[in-house]
């Protein structure tokens, strides 16, 4: 039986946008910790750091493993999540609560903001000579954490995007027209790029892919659509919600009648169809002189990308559990702080290893898609397939008749 | 070996909005017909009736069964689809093409418009003493064909809606707010009602469900949301794209800046986020005085409902194949025309039987949701579960912590 250096309680929290596998990480931490001597209570804080300052916890150490396993397989954050980004004063309250309740182990599952919260709280504890072990457990469908090959949550969201595009490509082929799909991703285009997995035949869409890593130009966009439509008689387009003009202004900001911002100063991108509708109108206006009445449609995949029940990537699911294990094991091994990262050892056969890096190295930093994957500012290269395929896992079988060939009887 | 009375060719077509299982019906017809003596060529017409008048066909009789099976499992219409609603002149061209090419067997997979096309063509053939066997094979995610307990395509679309709401309910619980999801369905609320499958615990959403069968009142809607939000601190809402005011005007018509209509005179409802965004704004405007800044989001599920790859209902898949078999078998048995219907014999254990009714009895008629399932104009009763559950099949496991209970340590 393992034991920890300092006897005390452990707190686990979930933060930011939920994913399909974030509960795997929660259960991963719990199942290691609950066999450790010296850990008294294992507490899940409700709605992230808010649960800590509001003293709202769930005791998880005595739950039957069958129940924990079912929770692990359930999408979204079972403990509740939070968009709070704790500043120093907020962290002060967290730290005081930890001190008062002899919390010695803190695991925060989230993106780079969560990593930063861990970092601040850990430094505060050091200043007060209070021995506190702080770990950031990675999670984000955006796949935008530095020092990581990829992050838990991304593979399942990417699988959803791939399945959606596989089906929508066939729908667009059956009833040809111009179709835009808006995909999540504020700064990083990984999830939008995942749409390329739907391409299996030469004429398959998405035919155009726009990511936030390159500037978006509306006139060029319409010219791109024109070219594809002239070639295939249809056009399927993947657009990241985070696309912006050359001066860095998000397209959504241009559209927002009433800009809604969250506590991080971010403009609301999701939960509205405005961007897709705007681009639809722009295409109709730009190309109707040439083509006459065009069938143009836009769908915004929205929250389904991160929450759809019953379609996780098996690899993502396993790795989300493993980063939880790794964080707990690092705490037991005596590391005082860290962020768990995933490194790829090999793509074929797929193999990864887990590491624990300094919180400060991950905190507040954003990774974006390698520019080498982006072609002409409007597409993703086939090389991306090797990167993303093992993260998503097997996709449905697609078989259809050739698009153009048809016998005349 | 079976044989048919009149030696000739067979044509199969797919029409209207594709579904996840419409290719099962195609393959169902083909696999019966290709073992029948007297059927020469089995031809798939490209893009529905348009392929007939344009003489654009695919020969399908000699395809390996493995390939046909893969096509059957692939979403969307492999032959291509069409929104053309053939009038008499159009049907005349179809009939002339059939006569010229000795087509004696016609199978049209689609909704009630397709049934009507079959009816007109069959009558024309009778007038010309040309022996033609015409069958309508049912397909629609809207589930709105009369004389049917349900229609192929609906179960899989309903499964998508259920999975989406299961996940989104948990997402809305993790990050509480008001969330609207817009679901397909112009006149019939079946698909929107399927969202009720996501409810497993007393506080689970959708908390409100709006279908086109009852008039929609914006003030009442806001009052409903207010009541739920006050109770649960969150509110998940299912809204049919087809909702309309008491005078019958679709809400979407009120919104459309530029009303786009298809050949059937229908206003475009799908492929835009406008309705969801409009309702979001209405809630923000209506309730911000009471609650302050509200987190309100809207997603429009869009085309994913009918095309998402890899998540069909097993029952739907099997039945879609069986209606194809039944249509071919009726032709062999010597029936001259008909529409295949599904009747439920029993819900538990689930059992159905297939029938062939007169085309005229199905053509151009629309079935809607039984009013007895609709509660207070804003919800669906639990009784609907018995109806819909066997059509959707097993859903993912959901396990989570109680919503409100939390220990104070």
Image (cartoon, coloured by chain):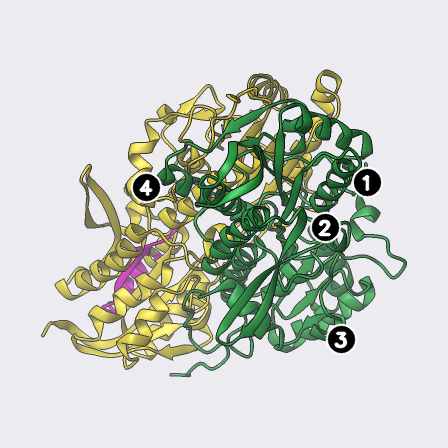
Chain colours: A yellow, B green
Q: Is residue A128 visible?
A: no
* Alpha carbons under labels 1 and 4: distance apart: 53 Å
In front: A8, or A389? Answer: A389
With A137 as the anchor, is B190 left or right in this view? right
Mark nearer the N terminus (3 vs 1): 1
Q: Is residue B230 above or below residue B328?
A: below
Crowd around label 4: few <14 · some 14–19 · many ≥20 (10 Å): some
Label 4 sits on residue? A146
Chain letter for mark 4: A
Residue span colored magenta: A120-140
Which quadrant is the C terminus of chain A positioned in? top right
* Figure quadrant of residue B409: bottom left
- Both on one chain, marks 3 and 4? no
- Both on one chain, marks 2 and 1? yes
Tell me, for residue B376, which label it has, or none. 3
- Both on one chain, marks 2 and 4? no
The image position of residue A171, as x and y in percent, is 56, 38
Label 2 sits on residue? B359
Label 1 sits on residue? B265
Crowd around label 3: few <14 · some 14–19 · many ≥20 (10 Å): few
With A313 as the anchor, is A409 left or right in this view? right
* Alpha carbons under labels 2 and 3: distance apart: 36 Å
The image position of residue B185, as x and y in percent, is 69, 54
Which SS class for mark 4? loop
* Alpha carbons under labels 2 and 1: distance apart: 23 Å
- Both on one chain, marks 1 and 4? no
Tell me, for residue A109, which label it has, or none. none
- Both on one chain, marks 3 and 1? yes
- Both on one chain, marks 2 and 3? yes
Mark nearer the N terminus (2 vs 1): 1
Q: Nearer the viewer, mark 1 or mark 4?
A: 1
Chain letter for mark 2: B
């Amino acid at each position: 039986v393992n034991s920890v250096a300092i006897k005390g309680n452990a707190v686990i929290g979930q933060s930011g946008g939920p994913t399909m596998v974030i509960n795997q990480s929660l259960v991963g931490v719990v199942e290691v910790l609950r066999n450790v001597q010296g850990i008294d209570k294992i507490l899940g804080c409700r709605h992230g750091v808010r649960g800590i300052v509001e003293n709202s916890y769930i005791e998880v150490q005595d739950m039957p493993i069958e129940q924990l396993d079912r929770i692990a397989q359930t999408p979204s954050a079972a403990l509740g999540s939070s968009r709070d980004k704790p500043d120093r004063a907020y962290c002060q309250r967290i730290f005081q609560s930890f001190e008062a309740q002899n919390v010695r182990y803190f695991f925060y599952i989230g993106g780079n903001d969560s990593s930063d919260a861990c970092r601040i709280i850990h430094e505060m504890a050091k200043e007060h000579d209070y021995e506190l072990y702080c770990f950031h457990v990675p999670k984000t469908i955006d796949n935008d954490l530095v020092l990581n090959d990829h992050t838990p949550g991304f593979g399942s969201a990417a699988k959803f995007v791939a399945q959606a595009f596989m089906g929508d490509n066939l729908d667009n082929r059956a009833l040809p027209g111009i179709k835009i799909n808006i995909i999540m991703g504020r700064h990083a285009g990984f999830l939008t790029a995942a749409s390329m997995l739907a391409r299996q035949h030469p004429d398959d869409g998405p035919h155009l892919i726009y990511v936030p890593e390159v500037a978006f130009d509306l006139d060029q966009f319409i010219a791109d659509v024109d070219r594809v439509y002239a070639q295939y008689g249809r056009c399927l387009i993947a657009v990241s919600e985070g696309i912006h003009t050359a001066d860095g202004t998000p397209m959504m900001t241009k559209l927002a009648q009433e800009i809604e911002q969250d506590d991080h100063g971010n403009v609301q991108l999701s939960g509205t169809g405005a961007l897709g509708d705007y681009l639809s109108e722009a295409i109709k206006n730009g190309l109707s002189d040439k083509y006459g009445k065009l069938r143009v449609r836009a769908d915004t995949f929205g929250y389904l990308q991160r929450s759809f029940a019953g379609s996780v990537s098996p690899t993502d699911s396993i790795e989300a559990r493993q980063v939880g294990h790794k964080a707990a094991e690092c705490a037991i091994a005596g590391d005082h702080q860290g962020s768990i990262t995933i490194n790829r050892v090999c793509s074929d056969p797929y193999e990864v290893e887990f590491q624990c890096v300094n919180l400060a190295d991950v905190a507040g930093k954003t990774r974006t898609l390698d520019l080498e994957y982006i072609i002409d500012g409007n597409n993703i290269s086939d090389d991306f397939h090797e990167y993303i395929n093992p993260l998503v896992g097997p996709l449905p079988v697609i078989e259809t008749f050739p698009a153009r060939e048809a016998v005349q009887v």
